[in-house]
Amino acid sequence: MHKILFFVSAFLLVLTGCNGGKKQKLLSDSSGNLNNLSVVVSNEMWQGKVGEAVRSTMASPVDGLPQDEPLFSLSQIPPQVFSGFVTKNRTVLKIEIGPNKESTVKFAKNVFAIPQKVVVVSGKTEDEVVEQLESNALKIVEAFKSQETKEKQRRIKLSLLKIDTIENALGIKMEIPSAYRIAKKDDKFFWLRKDITTGTQNIMVYELPLNKLKHNDSLVNQIIKIRDSIGKVHIPGPTEGTFMITEKAYAPYLFEKTLDNKPAIETKGIWDVKNAFMSGPFINYMIEDKENNRLVVVEGFTFAPSVEKRDYVFELEAILKSIKIE
């Protein structure tokens, strides 16, 4: 009996482990829908200025969509019930207020599950918490979005499309779900599509001369001109003489990004079809590949009328960000 107890104790010791004197917790897998953020805050604060600050920062409208949709879908959880399986969501925002709390924002990972991103916003008063939320909103959003992008890319890797033709023609690698298919290839231009319940998901991949973008001119106007010329040649509409263009009523959003350690211009906006009633959101990356004296262009656009489009664009963004240029 003593031997049995000895081996059980030894086994438990191995499980808890010891690394530099610190015990290693055994954590279960995280869970939850993509872009669903758990907000741990009391009911009273959720109804007041703290809740308003959380909603205005974490549920602000996504750039480049035809209608307002939130960055994250928020699920409020009172602290007293934040235990057990409720703690396993992949992204968690905790609000802590008390006389001994430091006014700060702390980022942690794999606290209650793996993988997981936990952000704790604290302060002595509600006003201090609101100030921390608003002044650190960009960092907090990026932390959660990065976590969700990694999770989406992990799921995509479970079933990938073979794109040898694209890799050989353009010298790039991308992780694209097997549900997509190559709808058109023309020299070094490729159009991929996936059928969805209400329409299609679309990806374009092509290259341009490096000097096609001149940074001393209006980048927005240049990118619109390039998009419209590509759409006219390669993306026809439903009837003769119709083709994809950039919606002129909405100015696209431009951001400086880095993809595959290379500078890139991210453009988010609305496309439509000239002389036809079709439109939707797009996300475009023009990547400077100086080693090969070219711009690599990857774009995703969604046609999904009458439904929310945030998660469709999020999928496209996750795919495009997987690019590797050889």
Image (cartoon, grey):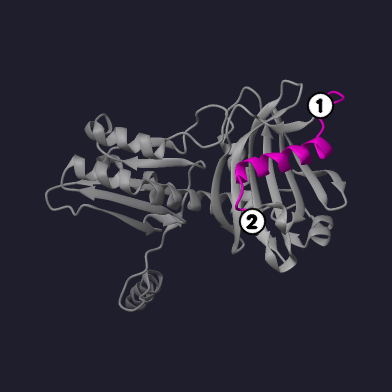
| Quadrant of image for the N terminus | bottom left
| Quadrant of image for the C terminus | bottom right
Task: For marks 1 and 2, give the CA distance.
Answer: 32 Å
Looking at the rendered structure, which numbered label has been put on residue 58?
none
Question: Given the image, on which type of amino acid does mark 1 rest?
Answer: Thr
Residue 302 is situated, as x and y percent measured from the top left of the image, at 67, 35
Q: Residue drawn 39% across and 49% down?
A: 140
Instruction: Based on the picture, tell me whether residue 231 belongs to the magenta stretch.
Output: yes
Taking the image as shown, residue 154 lies to the left or right of residue 212, namely left
Quadrant housing residue 193: top right
Residue 102 is situated, as x and y percent measured from the top left of the image, at 19, 54
Question: Given the image, on which type of amino acid does mark 2 rest?
Answer: Ser
Read off the residue under disc 1: 242
Residue 138 is situated, as x and y percent measured from the top left of the image, at 40, 48
Circles 1 and 2: CB atoms closer than 8 Å: no
Residue bounds of the magenta highlight: 215-241
Looking at the rendered structure, which numbered label has been put on residue 322?
2
Along the line of sight, the residue nearer the viewer: 215 or 316: 215
Q: Above or below — where is 173 with respect to 233? A: below
SS under mark 1: loop
The residue sitting at the left extreme is 99
Label 2: few (<14), some (14–19) or many (≥20) C-alpha neighbours in 10 Å: some
Instruction: Based on the picture, tell me whether residue 266 belongs to the magenta stretch.
Output: no
The residue sitting at the front extreme is 216
Q: Residue drawn 43% across and 54% down?
A: 116
Which is more foreground, mark 1 or mark 2? 1
SS under mark 2: loop
Residue 211 is situated, as x and y percent measured from the top left of the image, at 71, 57
Q: Residue drawn 49% across and 53% down?
A: 146
Query: Is residue 216 at all visible to an observer of this figure?
Result: yes
Count of numbered labels shown in the rendering: 2
